[in-house]
Amino acid sequence: MAVAIIGFGVTMLEDVGRMLRDPAGQPIAREMEVAAARPLEHLAKAIVDAFAFDLDHAFGFSSGRTRRSLLSAAPRWELFADGPVGPFDRGPRAGSVRRTAIAEAIPAPGRRLTFLFD
């Protein structure tokens, strides 16, 4: 049985909508491929590894594209989604990065998500 693979680009941002650039002025970016059936948690690890960071902070994925919508947009998926609702939770409840397949979060080419890494 063939494994479905999703290819995508990841660009590091220093702030919402503002690309982080290397000393030559080029965007800091990576091209990646992951198995579509794996959970979003696997995608987070792949992204963090590609930029040589440790996966030792909270993280999530959001369909929001602006600072205002990142934490309230639907759909979104978070590391702590399986825990209790906190007093600062806003908007619709987030999905789980451990129980949501990458293919479910990225169902079609061109879908954009923001990876939030604390």
Image (cartoon, grey):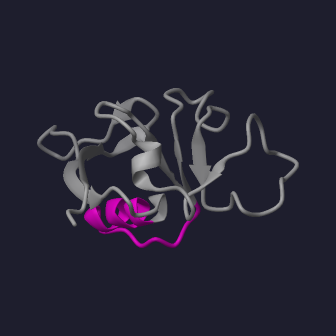
Decide: is 113 above or below 53: above
Point out the stretch of residues depicted in magenta. 42-58
Q: Nearer the viewer, residue 100 or 117?
A: 100
Instruction: Residue 81: name its quadrant.
Output: bottom right
Instruction: Residue 52: name its quadrant.
Output: bottom left
Q: Nearer the viewer, residue 21 or 100?
A: 100
Taking the spot 46% from the left edge, 46% from the top edge, the residue there is: 104
| Percent x, y of residue 27 | 21, 40
| Percent x, y of residue 12 | 33, 46
Pick the quarter of the image with the C terminus.
bottom right
Taking the spot 31% from the left edge, 41% from the top edge, the residue there is: 20
Pick the quarter of the image with the N terminus.
bottom left
Decide: is 101 above or below 25: below
| Percent x, y of residue 86 | 84, 53
Taking the spot 27% from the left edge, 59% from the top edge, the residue there is: 34
Left or right of residue 114, residue 70 in this image: right
Q: Is residue 32 magenta?
A: no
Taking the spot 59% from the left edge, 62% from the top edge, the residue there is: 58
Decide: is 19 above or below 31: above
Q: Nearer the viewer, residue 18 or 99?
A: 99
Q: Residue furthest right?
A: 87
